[in-house]
Amino acid sequence: MSDSLSINFSHVGVFVQNIDRMIDFYTRVLGFIMSDRGVLDNGTEIAFMTRNPREHHQVVLATGRPDGLSFNVIQQLSFRVGGLDQLREIYRRLVAENVVMEGPTLGPITHGNAISVYCRDPEGQRTEFFIDTPWYVHQPMRIPVDMSMNDAEMWAFVEGHARSLPGFKPLSEWHAEMDRKLAGVH
């Protein structure tokens, strides 16, 4: 069945405990700007931030996250960056800020179809910064990468590992398959 709806993801809103600390992280460390800030009728403080001049907001922070939550319902926030040099710059900034990047689901890794840096934001939310690769491999897949590798070493390492995995194919082939599925042709 073909679907004529045009749906594109636009932004995410996150409840926070310390809005000023989170605004500092997003603006000073990640380079977002605040496009608006205010208080809702119920007293909730809200901040709108963007890195795209055509988008009023890409991230919304709102007070109201309760203390002592045992589980964060958002699995992760993910941000695509403009290239390997920018990914390294984000990594450098996170290291300089002593942002948590240790743990089984954190740090610099590759999924074969992406190279990512995972960290915890100031309130513990798992956050990913990534670039796409030109390949597809079955997911989930993750192995650590060394951000000190130069571009040629990094791309050779990621491609070499990806080629060794089941389902490896050029991303263009995977895109064609998804086009067919979304058009209802199997």
Image (cartoon, grey):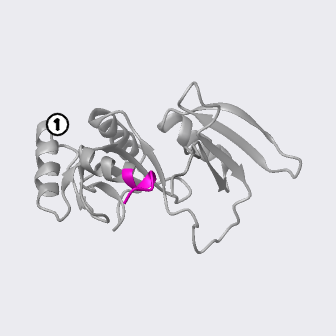
The residue type indicated by label 1 comes to: Asp
Q: Within the magenta stretch, is there residue 185?
A: yes
Q: Is 171 colored magenta in this rendering? A: no
Q: Is residue 78 above or below residue 33?
A: below
Other-residue count near label 1 (Cα within 10 Å), few / some / many at <14 / 14–19 / ≥20: few
x, y percentage for residue 15? 67, 56
Residue 115 shows in the view:
no
| In-front residue for pair 108/131 | 131
Residue at figure coordinates x 58%, y 42% from the top left: 10
Residue closest to the far bottom: 70
Q: Which residues are magenta?
A: 180-186
The percent position of residue 28, horizontal first and vertical second, equals 52, 34
Give the image quarter of residue 88. Answer: top left
Count all numbered tags in the image, as a single digit. 1
Residue at image point 38% right, 48% down: 179
Position of residue 107 measured from the top left corner of the image (x, y, whole percent): 32, 56
In the image, 18 versus 14, the foreground residue is 14
Question: Which residue lies most toward the top here?
Answer: 53
The secondary structure type at the circle numbered 1 is: helix
Is 173 positioned to the left or the right of 92 in the image? left
Identify residue for label 1: 151
Do we see residue 7 in this rendering?
yes
Q: Quadrant of the C terminus?
A: bottom left
Q: Position of residue 172 (x, y in %)?
A: 26, 44
